[in-house]
Amino acid sequence: MSETTDPTTAPSNEPAGADDLRATLARAVTDGRATPLLVALDFDGTLAPLQDDPQASRILPAGVDVLARLGGTDAVALALVSGRAMSDLHALAEVPAGTYLVGSHGAERARVTRYGLDRDVVQLTDEQSDRLATLGAQAAQVARGRDGVWVETKPTAVVVHTRLAEPDVAGPAEAEAITLGERLGSGVLHGKDVVEISVLRASKGEALTALRDELGAPVVLYAGDDVTDEHAFDALGDDDVTVKVGAGRTGARFRVDDPAAMVDVLADLADALGV
């Protein structure tokens, strides 16, 4: 049975703003309870402004600098948690060695080294591989003849993108993709202008929980902009710091306006850590 993310189910209470976020992080750093602090961040829409062409996405230059600062201290464990395929995320993200990369909404994981990626290998069963091939073929039928709709194939999933489509084209395409996923997928994620159908059960929340347990991180800072990031917000506790980047209903504790504002908060965190 598949599981579909519904963006309308997130709580609607307005989160606190950037000033409260800065104060919370400063307290966590100064009282010493957050070591190591796991700083986990979505990529698109959180560190990199959204682009019509996904391959044009880049972390803001100031963000590259601040991630290098945060990655250079033992007080922080740094991670990017993205829906992108791992190879794509690694190619686009300019992050320091030691950074954990979580791709495909938690289905793929690696760590950046000076010599490349130290990857956890994803292995599909024969049945999952066959289902992925069938999903790819049928998703192509969803996109065929619809301007602005295209299909991406990942190691564990098929993604129907609608960012470039007009609303009257995007809506029916997304609805058909969701129906396809409920029939053939193990999980369906409906985010901003995208429907991802996976043959493995994975979520950003599960991946983030596993990483924090592995690292023994008492506090997690997680920031994301999309519906799929709500899984991560929900998986974290009351002492963790969850940040919604941009508008929209959310279960996060805090909100900032855009990637530039998120980078500013991270720079203040680096200053508080003295790095």
Image: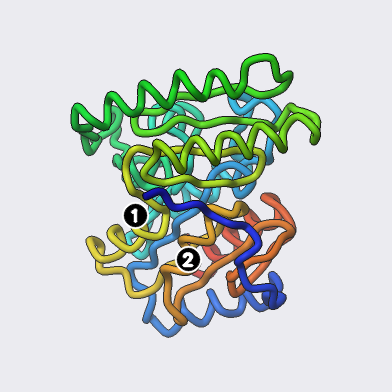
Callout 1 secondary element: helix
In the rendered view, tell whether residue 55 sits above or below residue 11: above
- Tell me the quarter of the picture where residue 125 sits: top left
Tell me if 153 is positioned left or right of 65 in this view: left
> Could you tell me which residue is drawn at 42 percent across and 54 percent down?
204
Label 2 is placed on what type of residue?
A: Leu
Tag of residue 256: none
Q: Give the image location of residue 173, x and y in percent.
A: 65, 31
Report which residue position mark 1 lands on: 207
Q: Specify whether residue 182 is in view.
A: yes
Q: Is residue 275 above or below residue 154?
A: below
**Mark in the foreground, 2 or 1:** 1
What residue does disc 2 label? Answer: 221
The residue lying at 59 percent from left, 65 percent from top is 243
Q: Secondary structure at mark 2?
A: strand
> Do we see residue 19 in this rendering?
no
Return the x and y of residue 24 as percentages of the image width and height. 56, 79
